[in-house]
């Protein structure tokens, strides 16, 4: 539309045109999303990560170090 044609439209028509334009844009983005979902793998839903306390991490670390110390001691014999 030309500028002088827009100036001659009523406010109600301009609002209706703006609403329709935004609806078309939303529908186009939904259409693009649907098309994209068919070509891509769906996103993985990861498990919720559990938090480990510092004491628990330390305990695991000490146990691993003790296991490796046994392995090294057995290797040197």
Image: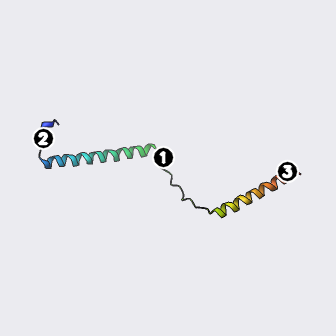
Residue 40 position within the rendered picture, expressed as x and y whole percent measured from the top left: 46, 44
Q: Nearer the viewer, residue 66 or 33?
A: 66
The local crowd at label 1, few if under 14, some if 14 to 19, many if 20 or more residues have their Cα within 10 Å, is few
> What colour scheme does the image use?
rainbow
For marks 1 and 3 on the same chain, the one whose residue lies earlier in the sequence: 1
- Name the residue rendered at 70%, 60% in the picture: 60
Q: Are marks 3 and 2 in contact (CB under 8 Å)?
A: no
Q: Which residue matches tag 1?
A: 41
Q: Is residue 48 left or right of residue 14?
A: right
Q: Is residue 50 left or right of residue 74?
A: left
Helix or strand or loop: what does disc 2 sit on?
Answer: helix
Residue 66 position within the rendered picture, expressed as x and y whole percent measured from the top left: 77, 58
Q: Is residue 60 left or right of residue 6?
A: right
Give me the C-alpha separation between circle 1 and circle 3.
Answer: 48 Å
**What quarter of the picture does the N terminus occupy?**
top left
Q: Is residue 56 above or below residue 31?
A: below
The local crowd at label 3, few if under 14, some if 14 to 19, many if 20 or more residues have their Cα within 10 Å, is few
Q: Which residue matches tag 2?
A: 7
Q: Nearer the viewer, residue 65 or 8?
A: 65
Tell which residue pokes out farthest to the right in this image: 77
Q: Which residue matches tag 3?
A: 75
Helix or strand or loop: what does disc 1 sit on?
Answer: loop
Residue 35 position within the rendered picture, expressed as x and y whole percent measured from the top left: 39, 44
Q: Toward which corner of the image does residue 28 lie, by quadrant?
A: top left
Q: Is residue 24 above or below residue 65?
A: above
For marks 3 and 2 on the same chain, the one whose residue lies earlier in the sequence: 2
- Name the residue rendered at 12%, 38% in the picture: 5
């Amino acid at each position: 539309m030309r500028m002088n044609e827009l100036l001659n439209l009523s406010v109600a028509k301009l609002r209706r045109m703006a609403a329709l334009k935004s609806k078309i844009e939303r529908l186009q983005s939904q259409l693009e999303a649907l098309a994209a979902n068919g070509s891509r793998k769906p996103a993985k839903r990861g498990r919720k990560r559990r938090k480990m306390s510092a004491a628990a991490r330390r305990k695991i670390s000490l146990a691993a170090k003790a296991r490796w110390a046994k392995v090294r001691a057995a290797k040197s014999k």
